[in-house]
Image (cartoon, helix red, strand yellow):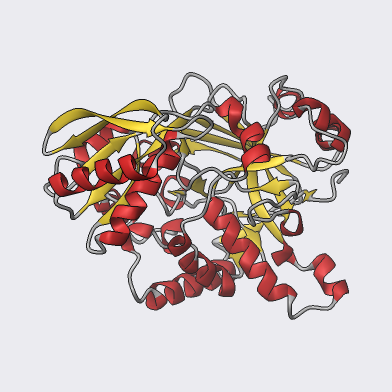
Amino acid sequence: MSLDCIRLPRLLFPAQGIDLSRFAVIACDQFTAQPSYWEHAERFVGGEPSCLRLMLPEVWLSADDRPRIEAIHRTMQAYLHDGTLSPLPEGLMLIERDTGRGCPRRGVLLSFDLEAYDETPGADTPIRPTEATVTERVPARLAIRSEAPFELPHILLFLDDPAHTVLEPLFAACAELPPLYDFELMQGGGHITGRLVSPGAQTHAFESRLAAHAAPDACRARYGLGADAAPLVFATGDGNHSMAAAKAHWERVKATLSPEECETHPARWVLAELVNLHDGSICFEAVHRLLLDTDTSDALHFLTDWLAAEIPQDAKPCPITIRRQGQEMQFMLPVPDGVLPVTVLQSALDAYLHAHPRAGIDFIHGTDTLLHLADAPGRIGFVLPDFPKEQLFPYVMQHGVLPRKTFSMGTALEKRYYLEARAIR
């Protein structure tokens, strides 16, 4: 392709006759505070082939995940050997996902070069994370990937294209292409359609548009950057931890390879769905905080005292809603200029958790879900303001990554479902 850091993938896909509504499963990091979601998924899938057997829902993470991970690897091998998964021809998968927002989310599956990605603060690579990682969420994904014959992505990468010049013409040109799949996702996930575009005139035109958009001079002009600035081309919108795990796995593999082998090894690439940040379906919503297993009165006193001591006195008060024991109240969060409210709140919560190791925290998508979960004893819910999506690329280039779990692309049910796969061994 015209850009060195992307290529057309050759996907693995379920065989004809497999119930895709049971096969496709939501990302592993969703509904971590609602085991009932995953229990229902187990009942719905039953004994049918499913990505539920190929991933580890983080609600079930434990001190010893090895038996589950070994079972995942065995199932992966079985699905390859018995034909549950088989290779498709090389091409672009155009995905339309209707989640009820009035217009479908449109994305294209591509392979991205992990040599062009770096999660290190201050990195100037073309592909960068948007949020800091939660380190405890990487090891299980890395352990799965380390012995996996293929990957299943829930990574979404953003393209900052407010003029809709890159992806949208491809979808318009291929609108009459017969779909490879077209079905309802389980448990209210909406409707999804996929069309496979073979290499040819449409893919070449797409490559040219993407290359023009990603050209360094065009990027610098778009953001008003200096001649020496390294622009951001692709930003991780979802799946930061999966990107981090893929990168860590590639670094391990790379250390065992010759320079020639490094050029062609499939683990060097990661499969992700490229989405225009300005797609009408993309809505940034805050990821809220839920403090667990705590004395709620003591926690609020601690946070108030910590903020008074650590945050400058000239910080502007930002009212946020908190909920505990069925009651809502306003909490005045002091926020200095140029700092995000989530940065201040997370710093205060980190201090509290350090001083109270028996307490815990969860990151919740959806205000209604947070308010419901916060009603249980020993919990406090903190409702954070949304982060404007137009600020994403400029903020990351200027400040680096956002605090972990700053925003979510919609609610939990709008997250990407595992479906297509790609060989990495």
Total marks shown come to: 0
**In this orientation, which residue lies closer to the viewer: 403 or 20?**
403
Quarter location, residue 194 = top right
- Residue positioned 46% across, 40% down in the render: 406
Residue 410 visible in image:
no
Asked whether, in this view, residue 414 is left or right of residue 295, the answer is: right
Asked whether, in this view, residue 247 is left or right of residue 49, the answer is: right
Instruction: Return the x and y of residue 31 as percentages of the image width and height.
Output: 33, 48
- Residue positioned 88% across, 43% down in the render: 2
- Residue positioned 86% across, 36% down in the render: 215
Quadrant location of the C terminus in the rendered image: bottom right
In the rendered image, the vertical position of residue 419 relative to residue 415, given as above or below: below
**In this orientation, which residue lies closer to the viewer: 303 or 290?**
303
In the rendered image, the vertical position of residue 350 relative to residue 67, given as above or below: above
Instruction: Return the x and y of residue 160 as percentages of the image width and height.
Output: 68, 30
Residue 398 visible in image:
yes
Asked whether, in this view, residue 402 is left or right of residue 196, the answer is: left
Instruction: Return the x and y of residue 111 as percentages of the image width and height.
Output: 72, 51
- Residue positioned 45% across, 52% down in the render: 23
Residue at the far bottom in the pictured view: 256
Instruction: Return the x and y of residue 350 as percentages of the image width and height.
Output: 36, 53
Asked whether, in this view, residue 3 is left or right of residue 413, the answer is: right
**In this orientation, which residue lies closer to the viewer: 340 or 106?**
340
**In this orientation, which residue lies closer to the viewer: 298 or 38?**
298
